Image (cartoon, rainbow, N blue to C red):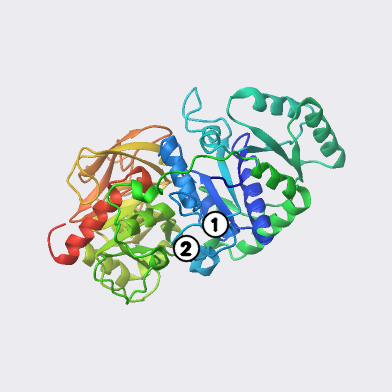
Amino acid sequence: MNLPRIVIAGLSGGSGKTLVSLGVVRALARAGLAVKPCKKGPDYIDAWWLALAAGHPTTNLDPYFLGADMLRSLFWTQCGLAGGQGQPAGQSSGGARVQDAPCGFSLLSRPGPFDMAVIEGNRGLFDGRDLSGSCSTAELARILGAPVVVVMDCTKMTRTAAAIVSGLRHFEQGVRIAGVILNRTAGPRHRTVLRETIEHYTDVPVLGVLPKLTDNPIPERHMGLVSGMEHEECVAGLDRVADIMADHVDLHRLREVAASAPAQRQPIADLWSLLPGADHTAPAPSAQRDVEPQAVHHARPRIGYVHDAALWFYYEENLLALRHAGADLVRLSLLDDALWPDLDGLYLGGGFPETLAARLAANRPALDRLRGLSDAGLPIYAECGGFMVLGRSIVMDGTEHPMANIFPVRTVFHPKPQGLGYVDATAVRDNPFHPVGAPFRGHEFHYSRCVPCDTPTAEGTAEPDCASSGPATLPVCALLLTAQSGHVTGMGEGRDGLLHNNTLAAYTHIFAPAVPHWAPAMVRAARGFRSGRPA
């Protein structure tokens, strides 16, 4: 079993690997190749842009969440080459392409076929969680048997670049540095010196030499790249980056490097059949798309997921896991006045609700609908931005925006991250989604802080009065978090997950293949609600 594949890595964050990855994927897709984009996770925004560039959803690959065997199974499953599901490139698999869906988001009913996979790394190539570099981009490359192309920021550097490449080449066994792309070069002489020294002192080919760009075609914000849903010129920006790559990167040699990736043993089954709770009576893949709001599939519970410009952080694998556990999915929005169908469950992902807080607050019928569904016992699972919408209000720049008021907390935004990193979580209260005592892994990244509504506010503002000695009691939480990297707080002091009836809302994001109990539990809860029995 084989598929041409490369890892595009950097020396550090900000080296230009994301821009190169987007441009390469877009250029290859424009040339007619079916490119499978992957991202060394966790990541939503870069993954969204990669999907838009390729025309196919991005698969997140993270050695922290999954062991080597499961990572390989996930990769080959999502490439359409596990469990005998592979097809020759060029044949249709019935999956929707990203550009066919509003906001550029879609799920493939069956992945593939693909001509090539491009895997964007994370931070520096060898940067991991510990001294041995565990969970690094290099480790992922070893697991997948993928050659690595390194993007180097060559600002004010010449011969030293060769020393760096030589060091990369010999630093870690099992990682094949198959090429470099030199970024931010100053001019023709600078480029010539860089290329000649690297190719003289090392056996690593220079696959491209990029000039300094006067501006970034893809804008950035505090969490990385700006969402294309906010950026009207996103497609034009991607095409501009693709033009730059086509002019300055040898795409033919890049494809040759990808084709040199060794064959790997085919997993005996696709990932979804290996996870507990899979519904083996599910419809054929061609039918596994979002159902129309008015459609009825009596045998399968209907779970809605809000996907709009406010909430759109969803791992494709989370939605696929719900489908494979037996649910039909319905895409919904909190930003319009469209009626919702009868639901058996609801999933609210993360996003940037703070950027549309005034608009969300103005749509009182939608927020009241959320409160009514929660009060009625509908199973609702909310992550980060979704949790913020379920609180009493969002406070942004001193202005308070009323939300659904399911939980007696406000989420107050700060200039710096209030929670960032991987977590190990354990459920400590009964809930429909996570068994008590069952550990699972997740991550968080948020600039807001959860503030109980009994916290006093400073005079003339909605901001909490930090100098006040008044009481501030956080509601009892369902989850306990242990920080594995970064600065992790949850809702405070390592606690996370507020409960109301069958609604669980937390800052923690999960990745369904790493939390195999989650999707079957949510579908069971939805079936219970549908039948009128307690979930």
- Residue 174's disc number: none
Q: Amino acid at mark 1?
A: Ala
Which of the two residues, 127 or 514, is positioned nearer the viewer here? 514
Image side of residue 455 versus residue 337, left or right: left
Residue 510 visible in the snapshot: no
**Residue where numbered disc 2 is placed:** 106
Which of the two residues, 263 or 279, is positioned nearer the viewer here? 263
Give residue 206's quadrant in the image: top right
Give residue 197's quadrant in the image: top right
Which percent across, then down, holds residue 305? 35, 62
Which of the two residues, 411 or 461, is positioned nearer the viewer here? 411
Image side of residue 129 versus residue 361, left or right: right
Q: Answer with mark 1 or mark 2, whichever residue precedes in sequence.
A: 1
Q: Secondary structure at mark 1?
A: helix
**Relative height, residue 318 to residue 356 (above, below):** above
Image side of residue 370 versus residue 41, left or right: left
**Relative height, residue 310 to residue 172 (above, below):** below
- Residue 51's disc number: 1
Neighbours of disc 1 within 10 Å: few (<14), some (14-19), many (20+): many
Q: CA distance from mark 1 to mark 2?
A: 9 Å
